Amino acid sequence: MTAVDHVVVAAATLDEGVRWCEATLGVTPGAGGAHALMGTHNRLLDLSSERFPRCYLEIIAIDASAPAPTAWRRWFDLDDAALQQRLHEAGPQLVHWAARSERIDALAPRVDSGRVRAASRHTAHGELRWRITIRDDGRRGAGGALPTLIAWGDEHPCDHLPASGVALRSLAVGGIDADFETLQLAEAGVTRAPAGSTPLAVELDTPRGRLRITT
């Protein structure tokens, strides 16, 4: 079965992403790491709930100290000039989400989410490894509604994330009706957004109360 794995907030810089998390959610994100494959780095926050176990928030930004990839564009539209302009002008924003599945190789070509690639990053607990779908053009499917697919190795990031006091309560997507069925997203707890809604919306319980964030 497909499951909600994480939601992605992009920032112009990682420091701006941390400040957004503290100001918006009322908590400081935990440690993340660097992605040599993509020239990005991140911070993480556990969002696990009864409805969405082993789920987290990823705050991600281009790593200015790392070389940019030359054979493909960065994931999540991070190389898109319009997105970068919005991040610099309006601040960090929800851009995407990822769904985990052990059937990643079978599902990837059916939903056009990109080629399955191996990725890894160093952590304080050793090497974290996963397989993930990435389009060569770096584009998010359906404006962020169609999830990136991911399959983890021996460990999941939530295995070492402390409880945050923030929990994912709902995730709604719009405009991906056929893919919604293919990925069995209803069974994963995902709902369909009403017509005319933004591609992706999440609701979080936070120390500051219930919060709704959209793309």
Image (cartoon, rainbow, N blue to C red):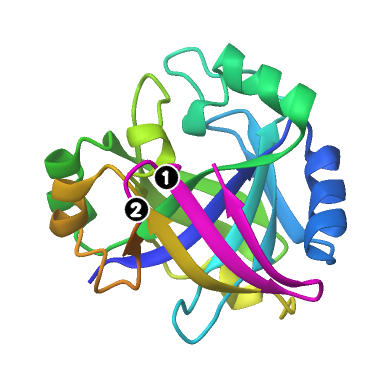
The quadrant of the picture occupied by the C terminus is top right
Residue 83 % position (x, y): 60, 22
What residue do we see at 43% from left, 70% from top? 154
Q: Secondary structure at mark 2?
A: loop
**Alpha-carbon span between mark 1 and mark 2:** 6 Å
Residue type highlighted by circle 2: Pro
- Label total for image: 2
What residue do we see at 58% from left, 76% from top? 159
**Residue picked out by circle 1:** 197
- Which stretch did the figure color magenta? 193-215
* Left or right, 172 with reference to 186: right
Residue 198 % position (x, y): 45, 42
**Residue picked out by circle 2:** 194
The answer to whether marks 1 and 2 mark residues whose Cβ atoms lie closer than 8 Å is: yes
From this view, report whether residue 207 is shown above or below residue 94. Answer: below
Q: Which of the two residues, 26 or 41, is positioned nearer the viewer here? A: 26
Residue 118 % position (x, y): 38, 43
* Left or right, 193 with reference to 60: left
